[in-house]
Image (cartoon, helix red, strand yellow):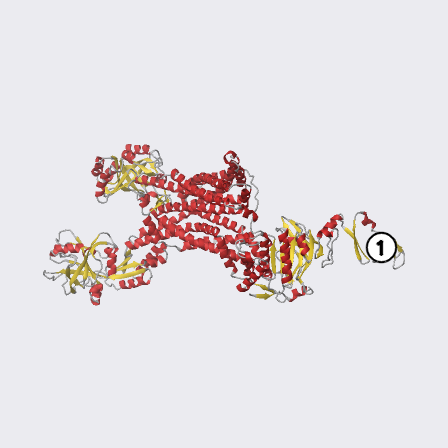
C-alpha cells in the first residue's frame, strides 16, 4: 500500500491550537446552493467539533440542512464560506483537490446511508470487501478485515447472500461493516458519517443497529457522526446537535430527550463568540428582532425587545461638560458654553 | 494519530477488475449494446470488404487468364540483344515482377530418312516443296510452358524434361505433308538446330549452308505434348509467324515459323555456348516475358494495380530504349472491372439509415445503462472510489464492449460481404459464388480504420454519459430507481402536422432540386435526416393515437383499456425510442424493397429498350435476301433490317442508321419519350413519306439551330468515298429503341444501354434516315442490325439456331439476356441486391434487439407495478395479457406508421439514389411497389416482433409479488 504524508507547515499553523481529541470540525461554514438563479442558504455559519471516540447526532426537521452538513463535513460538497478541518490531514480541506480528498478519505472516513448503498449484484461479503479493494488493501489483509467485520456485525450466516436477498437490518449491518473496512486497523480510529442509518428500519431493528454503533464505538474507538430524524438515535449519542434552517440551534449531552427540553435549550458560542438562537423558542417569543441581555448574580438574562419596550429603553441622559462644568441637556452632545464635545 | 496523515492512493487494477464483474453481471444488456454497435460497424465494412474482395478476384482472374503481363522485344534493325537480360533483371528488382524470362528461339529443320539439306533460305524458297520441313525451335523453360498451357489446347503434357519436346499441331500436320511421317505422342524426332542467322538476318538472296547456320544435330527427342493455338495470347504473339509460299511460288502465302509451327524444348537441352549463340545471333530476336507479382501489386493496393504495372512498363521503356515493350491488351477490362467496384462503394448511402440508427440506438442504450447505474456510481463513490477509478471502470467496460462489437461487426461483415457478391435476386444468392467471395475475403485498410473509428464511438458515448451523471453531491443515491412519469397531454395533432410538413418537404425536394451527382448525395443525406424526423414525429403521434384508441375500446379491452391508455401516455423515455427504432427499421425495410424492385424494373425496361424489339440480331453484314428469309420462319411477324454508315455536318460526326420507317415503327418498342417533335407514329410516318428525311438528335437540333421542316447538308461515307447529300429534317429525338441515346452530349455517367452493349458508342450519336435512300446513296446493302417482331421465343427457336450457326451472328432477346450476367453490371446489381438483403436482415435483428432491450428494461423497472397488480388480485395470466397487449400495441402502431413512411420514403429515395449511381437510365425511372414481397417481409418481421414482445410479458407475469414488494 502506498502512503503519503500530506500537509504544509503553514496549514498546520492554522489549526496549531486544535485539541488532539478533535477528529473533524466545521468553522463558520456557509453553504449556498444556486438553483434557477435563486440562492438557497443551506448552512449559515455552522461551527462544530467532533471528538475522538464520541457519537455525535444531528437532529432537525426536513430541509434544515442536515444532509448538506454531512456532505460538507465529508468533503463531498465544498463549503461556500468557512473551513472544514480533518484531523488526518491537519488542515482545512476546502482548498484541497477531489483526488487528495478521495485518497485521504479512504483510510479514515466511512459512509452509511439510509438505503445502505449496497451493490445488488454483489453478496454481503463482497459488498464489505469492495471499499478495501478500491483502496488497494492487499488481499490477505482485506480478507482478514472483512471476516472480522462480518463476524462483528453478526452476518456470518448470510455472508454469501446477494444484497437483494438481505433484510433491511442485515443491509444496514453490511453497510456499517463496509464503512469500517478501511478504518478498522487505523490507529486514529477514523470517523463514520451516517445519514439516516435507521430511517427505513423498524424501531426494534433500529435499536439493534444503534447498539451496534455503540459497541463499535466502544470496542474500536471509532467516532460516529449521525444525521437523523430519530429521537431514539439522539438519545444514544454523546452529543446531540439541533439544526434548523441551516443554523445550529442547540447542543445537548448524552441521553437528552428532546421532548423533555420543553422551552429550554442549551446553546454554544461559536468561534466568533456568537450565540445561535433556537428557532422554536424565537417563534414562541413572536420572532423578536432585538433582545435585552443582562448579567446579574452569575446569570445571563435574555429578554426579547418588542414594540414600545424598545423606545422606552431610550432614556435621554444629561451630561456635564468636562471642560467648563456646564450642564449639557439630554440628547445634546456639544457644550452650549464652551463648545466642547461629549466623549464616551 | 501517527498514521492519520497517511492516505491510500487506491488500487489501479480495481477499475478493470470491476469492469469485468460489471460485464458479467449485465451480460444480456452488454451483449445487446455490443451487437447494436456491431451492426453499425458491419455495414460500411461489408461494402469495403465486398469491393476489396471483388477487386482482388478481378485481379486474380486477370492473372489466371494472363500468364504474362509485359513482353519485350528488341526493336527491328537492332542486332544487339544484350538489353533484354538487363531489362529482365531490372523488372525483377522492382518488386512488382514475380518472374521474368528471356526466351531465345531460332530455326530447326526436321531430319529423317531423306536427303540431307545443303542450302537453306528462311524466306524465299518453297522449302516444303524441296523437302525441307523447317520450324521455330523455342528454348524455353517449364514456367513458360505452364503459362502457354493456359492459352492453348493440348494433349500429352506441357511439362518437359531434357530429351523431351512439345510440338504444335500445325508442325505435325506439315511434317506429314512434307515427309509423310506421322508425329504422335511418344514419337522420337531428330532436328538440326540453326545457331546462327547466316550473314546476320537473311534477305532475299541470303542463302546459308549447314556450316554457316551453325547446324547442331539433336537426335532422339521424344514428343510428349502436342498443342494447338486457339486464342490470341501474349506468349503466342511473342513468336509471330511469317507468311511464305511453301509449295508454289505463285500460290498464296501460309503462316510459318510462328508459335503454331514450333518445337519447344528446355533450354537445358543445349549447352551455354549454344544458348548464347542462339540468343545473340539466332534467326529471331529473343523475347522477354515479365509476369507481374500478384502479391506485390496487391500489397501496394488493389486500386493501384494498373497504375503500378503501367509505371513498370514506362520505366523499362525509358531505361532501355532499344526495346519495344508491349502487353496490357486486356488490362482495360480489368480496369473497368475494378472501377465498377470502386464506384459501387457509393452504395454505402443505402445503408446509411441503418448505420445511423445503430449509432443512435447505441447512444440510447448506453445512456439508459448509465442512468440506471447512478446509484451504483454513488455507492462506489461512498466506498472511496475516485472519479478516475469510476471513469476507468466504465471506460474499460465500454472498451471491452467496443472490442466485442468490433470483432462481431467484422465477423458479420466477413459473412455478409459475400452476399453482396453472390446475390442474384431479391433475398436469394448463389452459394458457390458466396463461398468464392468468402474464401477470398480481403479486408481493406480503410475498412479497418472506419470500423475502429465507429467502435470508438461507444467509449466516447459512455464517457459523455458518465461525466454527465457523475456528480460529487450524489453520494447516497438509491441504487434502484422508481420514478413516476406524468402522463403526456400534448395533442397528437401537433405531431401529425409536423409529420405532414416533413413529408411535404421530402416530396418537394427532388422536384425543386434535380438529384444528380453530389447534389443527389446531399439530398440523400437530407432525406435520411428527414427519415429520422418523420420517424420521431410519427412515433409520438402514433403513441398518442394508440392511447386514444385504447381509451375508446373499453368494450374490447375491458379493464386493460385504462391501463394501456395511461401507460402509453406515460413512459416517454421507454416507448418513444423503441417506437422510433421500430419505425426506422420497418421503414428502411419497405424503402429498400421499393428501391431494389424499382431499380430492377427500370433496368429491365432499359434492357428492353436497348434491345429495341422482341428480338435483335447483330452481325458484320446480313444480305437483304438472308434477312427476308427470316419471315419464312414461323413466329416471325415483321423484320426491320438496319444499315449504317458514318456521317458528318461540319465537324460534328455521327452515324446514320438506315431504317424502313414503317417496319421500324411496327417492330421497335417505342415510348412516348423517344421523340421530342411528335409521337413515334407521327415522326416515322413523316420519315416514311420523305425519301431524304432525317430524324436528328435533340442535341444537334439545338447546336445546329435546326427545326423540323428545315434541310441540312450531310457528308455521308459511301462504300468507297464520301458524298454530300441534303436531308430534310422530319423529326427530333431523344433516343430510339435499339440504338439508345441519340446523343450522349450533356449526359453525366454511362447509360444502362452501354453496359448492355447496345448503346451507339459514337459520342456524336446517330440520326435515323430511310434505308432505301441511304442504300442508293452509299451502295451499302448488308444490314449490321436486324430488329424482329416475334410471337414468342419458343416458336422462333429454329430461327435463332439457324442464325447462330453463321459466324459472327449474335441473337438477343429479353428471354436469353440476363442483366445479372452482364460482367460490367453484375457487381453493381448484386451489390444492391445483397445490400438490400443485408439491410433487411439487420433491420429485423435490430428491431428484435430493441424490443428485447427496451421492453426487458421496462419490465425490470416496473416490477413493483406488476407486483402490486398481482397483490391486488390479478392473476399471472391477466398480467401477461395486459403487458403483452401494451407492448404489442406499441409494435403494431410502429408497423402501421412505418408502412406509410416506407411508401413515401421508398419512392423519394429511389429517385434520389438513381441520381448517385454512375449509371443512368435513358427512360424515366419506373417506381414499383413489390406489394406481395412487401407484405410478406413486413408480416414476417411483425410476427417476429410480436412474438418477441411475449418474452418480457411472460417475465412480468412471473414476478413474485411477495419478494418484490418486500424490497420496495
Toward the viewer: B493 or B945?
A: B945
User: Is B103 situated above or below B555?
Assistant: below
**In the displayed structure image, the side of residue B350 where residue B235 appears, left or right:** left
Name the quadrant containing residue B384: bottom right
Please say whether residue A79 is visible from this viewpoint.
no
Q: Give the residue displayed 23% in from the left and 52% down from the top.
A: B231
User: Is B599 situated above or below A187?
Assistant: above
Residue A171 is situated, as x and y percent measured from the top left of the image, at: 58, 54
**In the displayed structure image, the side of residue B484 where residue B940 appears, left or right:** left
Name the quadrant containing residue B731: top left
Toward the viewer: B288 or B533?
A: B533
Residue B77 is situated, as x and y percent measured from the top left of the image, at: 23, 60
Toward the viewer: A73 or B222?
A: A73
Residue A7 is situated, as x and y percent measured from the top left of the image, at: 62, 65
Toward the viewer: B463 or B177?
A: B463
**In the displayed structure image, the side of residue A10 where residue B239 appears, left or right:** left
Spot the residue most to the front. A157
Amino acid at each position: 500500500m502506498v502512503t503519503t504524508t500530506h500537509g504544509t507547515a503553514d496549514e498546520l499553523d492554522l489549526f496549531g491550537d486544535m485539541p488532539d481529541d478533535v477528529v473533524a470540525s466545521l468553522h463558520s461554514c456557509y453553504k449556498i446552493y444556486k438553483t434557477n438563479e435563486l440562492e438557497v442558504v443551506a448552512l449559515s455559519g455552522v461551527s462544530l467539533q467532533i471528538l475522538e471516540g464520541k457519537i455525535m447526532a444531528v437532529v432537525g426537521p426536513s430541509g434544515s440542512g442536515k444532509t448538506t452538513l454531512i456532505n460538507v463535513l465529508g468533503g463531498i460538497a465544498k463549503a461556500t464560506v468557512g473551513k472544514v478541518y480533518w484531523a488526518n490531514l491537519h488542515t482545512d480541506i476546502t482548498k484541497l483537490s477531489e483526488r487528495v480528498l478521495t485518497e485521504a478519505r479512504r483510510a479514515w472516513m466511512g459512509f452509511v446511508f439510509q438505503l445502505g448503498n449496497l451493490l445488488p449484484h454483489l453478496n454481503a461479503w463482497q459488498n464489505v470487501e469492495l471499499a478495501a479493494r478500491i483502496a488497494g488493501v492487499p488481499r490477505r489483509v482485506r480478507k482478514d478485515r472483512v471476516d472480522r467485520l462480518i463476524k462483528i456485525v453478526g452476518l456470518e450466516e448470510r455472508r454469501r447472500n446477494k444484497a437483494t436477498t438481505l433484510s433491511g437490518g442485515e443491509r444496514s449491518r453490511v453497510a456499517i461493516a463496509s464503512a469500517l473496512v478501511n478504518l478498522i486497523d487505523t490507529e486514529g480510529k477514523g470517523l463514520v458519517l451516517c445519514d439516516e442509518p435507521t430511517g427505513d428500519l423498524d424501531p426494534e431493528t433500529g435499536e439493534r443497529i444503534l447498539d451496534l454503533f455503540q459497541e463499535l464505538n466502544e470496542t474500536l474507538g471509532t467516532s460516529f457522526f449521525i444525521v437523523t430524524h430519530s429521537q431514539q438515535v439522539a438519545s444514544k449519542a454523546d452529543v446531540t446537535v439541533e439544526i434548523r434552517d441551516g443554523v445550529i440551534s442547540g447542543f445537548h449531552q448524552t441521553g437528552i430527550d428532546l421532548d423533555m427540553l420543553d422551552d429550554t435549550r442549551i446553546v454554544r458560542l461559536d468561534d466568533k463568540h456568537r450565540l445561535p438562537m433556537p428557532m422554536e423558542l424565537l417563534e414562541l417569543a413572536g420572532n423578536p428582532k432585538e433582545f435585552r441581555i443582562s448579567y446579574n448574580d452569575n446569570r445571563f438574562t435574555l429578554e426579547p425587545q418588542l414594540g414600545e419596550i424598545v423606545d422606552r429603553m431610550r432614556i435621554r441622559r444629561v451630561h456635564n461638560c468636562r471642560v467648563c462644568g456646564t450642564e449639557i441637556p439630554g440628547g445634546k452632545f456639544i457644550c452650549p458654553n464652551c463648545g466642547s464635545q461629549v466623549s464616551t | 494519530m501517527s498514521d492519520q496523515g497517511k492516505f491510500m492512493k487506491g488500487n489501479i487494477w480495481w477499475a478493470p477488475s470491476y469492469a469485468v464483474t460489471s460485464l458479467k453481471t449485465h451480460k444480456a444488456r452488454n451483449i445487446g449494446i455490443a451487437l447494436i454497435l456491431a451492426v453499425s460497424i458491419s455495414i460500411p465494412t461489408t461494402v469495403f470488404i465486398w469491393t476489396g474482395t471483388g477487386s482482388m478476384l478481378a485481379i486474380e482472374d486477370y492473372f489466371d487468364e494472363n500468364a504474362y503481363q509485359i513482353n519485350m522485344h528488341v526493336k527491328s534493325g537492332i542486332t544487339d540483344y544484350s538489353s533484354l537480360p538487363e531489362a529482365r533483371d531490372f523488372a525483377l528488382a522492382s518488386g512488382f515482377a514475380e518472374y521474368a524470362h528471356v526466351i531465345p528461339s531460332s530455326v530447326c529443320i526436321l531430319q529423317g530418312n531423306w536427303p540431307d539439306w545443303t542450302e537453306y533460305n528462311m524466306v524465299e524458297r518453297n522449302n516444303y516443296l524441296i523437302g525441307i520441313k523447317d520450324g521455330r525451335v523455342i528454348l524455353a523453360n517449364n514456367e513458360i510452358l505452364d503459362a502457354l498451357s493456359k492459352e492453348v489446347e493440348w494433349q500429352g503434357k506441357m511439362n518437359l524434361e531434357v530429351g523431351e519436346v512439345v510440338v504444335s499441331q500445325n508442325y505435325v500436320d506439315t511434317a506429314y505433308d512434307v515427309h509423310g511421317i506421322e508425329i504422335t505422342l511418344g514419337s522420337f524426332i531428330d532436328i538440326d538446330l540453326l545457331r546462327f542467322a547466316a550473314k546476320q538476318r537473311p534477305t532475299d538472296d541470303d542463302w546459308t549452308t549447314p556450316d554457316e547456320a551453325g547446324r547442331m544435330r539433336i537426335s532422339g527427342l521424344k514428343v510428349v505434348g502436342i498443342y494447338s493455338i486457339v486464342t490470341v495470347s501474349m506468349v503466342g504473339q511473342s513468336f509471330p509467324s511469317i507468311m511464305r509460299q511453301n509449295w508454289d511460288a505463285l500460290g498464296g502465302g501460309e503462316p510459318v515459323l510462328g508459335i503454331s509451327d514450333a518445337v519447344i524444348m528446355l533450354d537445358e537441352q543445349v549447352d551455354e555456348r549454344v544458348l548464347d549463340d542462339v540468343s545473340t545471333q539466332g534467326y529471331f530476336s529473343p523475347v522477354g516475358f515479365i509476369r507481374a507479382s500478384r502479391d506485390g501489386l496487391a500489397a501496394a493496393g488493389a486500386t493501384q494495380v494498373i497504375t503500378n504495372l503501367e509505371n513498370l512498363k514506362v520505366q523499362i521503356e525509358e531505361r532501355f530504349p532499344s526495346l519495344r515493350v508491349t502487353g496490357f491488351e486486356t488490362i482495360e477490362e480489368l480496369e473497368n472491372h475494378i472501377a465498377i467496384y470502386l464506384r459501387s462503394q457509393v452504395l454505402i448511402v443505402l445503408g446509411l439509415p441503418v448505420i445511423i440508427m445503430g449509432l443512435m440506438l447505441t447512444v440510447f442504450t448506453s445512456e439508459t445503462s448509465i442512468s440506471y447505474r447512478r446509484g451504483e456510481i454513488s455507492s462506489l463513490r461512498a466506498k472511496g472510489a475516485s472519479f478516475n477509478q469510476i471513469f476507468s471502470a466504465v471506460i474499460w467496460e465500454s472498451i471491452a464492449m467496443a472490442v466485442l462489437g468490433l470483432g462481431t461487426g467484422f465477423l458479420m461483415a466477413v459473412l455478409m460481404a459475400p452476399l453482396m457478391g453472390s446475390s442474384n435476386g431479391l433475398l436469394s444468392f448463389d452459394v458457390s459464388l458466396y463461398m468464392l467471395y468468402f474464401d477470398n475475403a480481403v479486408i481493406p485498410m480503410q475498412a479497418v480504420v472506419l470500423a475502429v473509428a465507429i467502435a470508438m464511438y461507444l467509449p466516447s458515448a459512455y464517457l459523455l454519459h458518465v461525466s454527465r451523471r457523475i456528480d460529487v453531491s450524489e453520494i447516497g443515491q438509491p441504487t434502484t430507481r422508481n420514478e413516476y412519469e406524468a402522463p403526456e397531454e400534448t395533442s397528437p395533432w401537433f405531431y401529425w402536422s409536423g409529420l405532414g410538413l416533413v413529408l411535404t418537404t421530402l416530396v418537394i425536394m427532388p422536384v425543386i432540386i434535380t438529384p444528380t451527382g453530389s447534389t443527389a448525395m446531399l439530398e440523400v443525406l437530407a432525406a435520411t435526416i428527414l427519415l429520422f424526423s418523420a420517424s420521431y414525429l410519427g412515433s409520438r403521434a402514433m403513441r398518442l393515437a394508440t392511447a386514444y384508441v385504447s381509451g375508446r375500446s373499453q368494450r374490447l379491452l375491458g379493464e386493460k383499456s385504462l391501463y394501456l391508455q395511461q401507460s402509453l401516455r406515460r413512459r416517454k423515455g421507454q416507448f418513444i425510442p423503441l417506437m422510433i427504432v421500430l419505425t426506422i427499421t420497418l421503414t428502411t425495410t419497405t424503402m429498400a424493397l421499393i428501391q431494389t424492385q424499382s431499380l430492377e424494373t427500370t433496368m429491365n425496361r432499359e434492357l428492353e429498350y436497348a434491345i429495341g424489339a422482341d428480338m435483335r440480331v447483330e452481325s458484320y453484314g446480313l444480305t437483304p435476301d438472308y434477312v427476308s428469309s427470316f419471315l419464312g420462319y414461323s413466329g416471325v411477324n415483321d423484320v426491320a433490317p438496319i444499315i449504317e454508315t458514318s456521317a458528318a455536318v461540319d465537324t460534328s460526326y455521327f452515324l446514320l442508321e438506315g431504317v424502313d420507317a414503317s417496319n421500324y415503327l411496327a417492330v421497335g418498342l417505342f415510348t412516348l419519350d423517344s421523340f421530342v417533335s411528335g409521337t413515334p407514329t407521327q415522326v416515322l410516318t413523316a420519315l416514311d413519306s420523305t425519301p431524304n428525311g432525317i430524324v436528328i438528335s435533340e442535341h444537334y437540333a439545338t447546336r445546329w439551330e435546326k427545326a423540323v421542316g428545315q434541310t441540312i447538308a450531310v457528308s455521308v461515307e459511301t462504300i468507297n468515298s464520301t458524298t454530300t447529300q441534303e436531308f430534310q429534317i422530319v423529326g427530333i429525338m431523344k433516343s430510339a429503341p435499339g440504338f439508345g441515346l441519340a446523343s450522349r452530349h450533356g449526359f453525366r455517367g454511362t447509360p444502362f444501354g452501354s453496359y448492355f452493349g447496345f448503346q451507339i458508342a459514337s459520342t456524336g450519336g446517330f440520326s435515323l434516315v430511310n434505308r432505301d435512300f441511304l442504300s442508293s446513296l452509299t451502295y451499302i446493302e448488308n444490314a449490321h442490325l436486324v430488329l424482329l417482331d416475334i410471337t414468342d421465343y419458343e416458336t422462333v427457336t429454329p430461327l435463332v439456331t439457324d442464325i447462330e450457326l453463321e459466324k459472327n451472328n449474335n441473337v438477343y432477346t429479353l428471354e436469353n439476356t440476363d442483366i445479372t450476367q452482364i460482367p460490367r453490371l453484375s457487381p453493381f446489381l448484386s451489390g444492391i441486391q445483397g445490400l438490400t438483403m443485408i439491410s433487411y436482415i439487420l433491420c429485423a435483428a435490430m428491431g428484435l434487439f430493441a424490443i428485447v432491450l427496451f421492453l426487458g428494461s421496462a419490465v425490470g423497472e416496473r416490477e413493483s407495478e406488476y407486483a402490486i397488480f398481482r397483490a391486488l388480485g390479478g392473476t399471472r395470466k391477466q398480467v401477461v395479457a395486459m403487458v403483452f397487449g401494451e407492448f404489442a400495441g406499441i409494435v403494431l402502431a410502429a408497423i402501421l406508421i412505418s408502412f406509410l413512411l416506407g411508401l413515401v420514403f421508398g419512392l423519394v429515395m429511389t429517385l434520389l439514389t438513381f441520381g448517385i449511381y454512375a449509371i443512368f437510365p435513358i427512360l424515366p425511372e419506373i417506381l414499383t411497389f413489390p406489394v406481395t414481397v412487401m407484405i410478406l417481409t413486413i408480416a414476417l418481421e411483425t410476427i417476429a416482433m410480436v412474438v418477441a414482445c411475449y418474452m418480457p410479458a411472460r417475465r412480468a407475469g412471473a414476478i413474485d409479488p411477495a419478494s418484490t414488494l418486500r424490497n420496495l
